[in-house]
Image: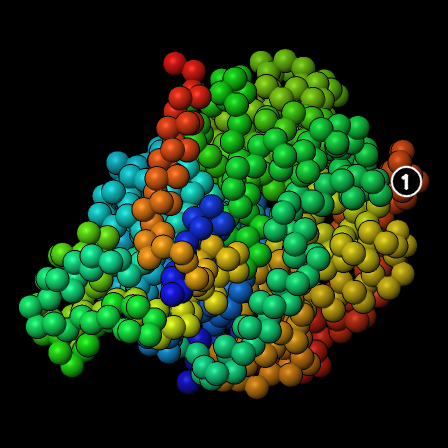
Amino acid sequence: MIAGWVGKVLKVDLSARTHEVQELNLRWARDFIGGRGLGARYLYELLQDPTIDPLSPDNVLIFATGPLTGTNASCGARYMVVTKGALTNCITTSNSGGHFGPELKFAGYDLLIVAGRAASPVYLWLCDGEVELRDASGVWGKGVWDTDDMLREEVGVPDARIASIGQAGENLVRFAAVMNDKHRAAGRSGVGAVMGSKNLKAVVVKGSGSIPVADQASFLRSQWKKKASLRDSKGRQNFTQLGTSSTLMPINAIGALPTHNFLQTVFDGAEKISGERINDDYVVAHKACFACTIACGRVSKISDEAGGRFLLHTSPRNWKMAGEGPEYESMFGFGPEVGVDDPEAIIAAHWLCNDYGMDPISAGATIGAAFELSQEGVLNGTEGVLEWGDAGKMLQLLEDTAFRRGLGDEIAEGSKRMGEKFGRPGVAMVSKGQEFAAYDGRAMQGRGLSYATSNRGACHLKAEVLRADYKDPGHEGKAGQVARTENQISALDSSGLCLFLNSGATYDDYIAEFNSATGMDLSMDDFVTAGERIWNLERLFNLRAGITPADDTLPKRMLEDPIPTGPRKGMVSKLGEMLPEYYDLRGWPEGIPSQEKLAELGLEAIA
Amino acid sequence: MKQLVIHPERCTGCMQCELACSFVQTGTFQPSVSVIKVHVFDEQASMAPYTCFQCEEAWCMTACPVNAITIDNVIGAKVVLSEVCVGCKLCTIACPFGTIFYNPESNKAFKCNLCGGDPACAHACPTAAIEYEDSETKDWVGPWAERLNESFLTALAGEPS
């Protein structure tokens, strides 16, 4: 037995309205760590035909915790939503914090696997041993914040924890998110649309169970050490103060802040929407996820005047109180990407995304692409001309997207499909159909490569190249760094920990706590190998799903159009030079994992 | 004498206190048995850890028909003597703060005993929202509530009508 787990998997078939509790496959838990890796292993097994339409009842939606989820390991709040992404047709692993993941374990399950499609909207109520599908018609059509309040009242448990979808998930917006604890998002690749396609409005959980660790004394020692390093770290202190929003000014300063749909990389209005400015003017509290000693979350308030101006008379219902955010990525998506320099508009947009249940990166980026299409004159819709910086139009489009009204119906398909529809595929700043995050892939070469190689489509969280790209604009050495950190992060992501512990803790801290919690004895090498196994498994899923190495690419704007102005003027992505090196380092001739590599990782039997 | 003093304005809602409390009791992580609870007031962006503050009146002691609750003379905690407790739950009804609990498995009452003078919750709190410190008065809650009330009234008075 490996400790850290409660040892059970709950499988719910929505079509048949049945459920069963299975023993956790501990061999898989050992080989794939947990969370992201373990969820991917189950998905690989359960989706025998990975070419299925992600929005069909054949898709499987997995909520996967890690062995450290729910312990007092700092940053151990995380769970993963693993499925075939509605936006990308690739495997997706969307991570979220808050309190939902730990609560799922306290209720007695390491993983929740949802298959099929309910005949009408339902929610799943899990309370210790109790498993019940209940009618959700009373909350269907409601936003996430209302749904959360109403369902907690309905089950009569004020501290039940809820993962749900908003209107965007119901309306199958391809970048809809699964939201938990109102403000926390398993945000990317359309996991919320998959949930919506299953007619599953929410999972409501209350648990009173316990999570054991293998070696209590050494686990506690590892925690004291890790918490002390976090407490004393300058990076952590900065992160507690400003959270992810601290990233905006430095990235703008090196000319890597995507502006006007990546036509520019420097934003003149950056100062006005900086994390420092938002912290001073709008942040009212700092909030942590479960067990987190960093507390990067910030809670904001905006003025009534701005709320009235930005449509907030209807949604979210309780915006006058306080809402979480904004984060760096939403500040980009609803700021420079569309030329908006009004912090209140950005906060409002972030809240609307949380309430409708949408990924602010893909939402902002697709609206940015729509702005560009409008200026090229190819839209000719009723929306008029969309000028950079028009916050009102941006917010209107955001609402239209969640409800699939007018141009919003096209935006809801994501920028790749929207660009193709209007005959301008070049406006889509995507890899594998998923929008880039808030870093230009030309100014940051490693990031560009990691966008192209990410198994869930463009993502800024699958490799750690931020510091390297910040210091060094060149592309040399970046392939190695991307491959190495992709492996490390795959393992870390799978454990139930948050990537942001990199702001002060080390991988040594991590190994110590992981081993003492699980009773395993992983070295750093074993750990990285497990990560490599996970990365290759995700790759195998995608290859079986019809994704090819030709999809490991970037749009023409990144590869051929030099950055027009700013400190990194003239740069284009050197993807053509980095990618062969990357394949080489991975043991993937022509982009396909070799038999030797698969054998080395113990994956030859399932490939 | 030292007391648990709580500063809600520093709390981030991370639940480290609940995890530490449950670990002391069970050797596992099980917030449901924690005797310190973090109350979250979501819309006000306010979080508050809350536990027995070892009040002077000690209604739990008064209510107990078998004298199973005594005062620890060294640290001043009100402590449940498990071997004496008969599980009648009168204490849980008597406590105006809801900080003494009943365990159906053991049929005993349980509450914060200040971990024998070294409270794990205070150690675990990363933001010093829970401190175990010398206090001039035995009852810090009264003056604290008064201050809070004053600030509420000030805020109310400041609101345009």
Closer-to-camera residue (A228/B152): B152
Q: Residue A563: which quarter of the image?
A: top right
Q: Quadrant location of the C terminus of chain A?
A: bottom right
- On screen, A376 above or below A100? above
Instruction: For residue B103, say whether it is visible.
Output: no
Closer-to-camera residue (A102/A439): A102
- On screen, B85 above or below A14? below
Q: Quadrant location of the N terminus of chain A?
A: bottom left
Q: What residue do we see at 67% from left, 33% from top?
A: A277
According to the picture, the residue beneath numbered tag 1 turns out to be: A567
- Residue type at mark 1? Pro
Q: Residue A138: which quarter of the image?
A: top left
- On screen, A155 above or below A262? below
Q: What residue do we see at 38% from left, 62% from top?
A: B3
Q: Residue furthest right?
A: A570
Badge 1: residue crowd in 10 Å (few <14, some 14–19, many ≥20) = some
Closer-to-camera residue (A125/A268): A268
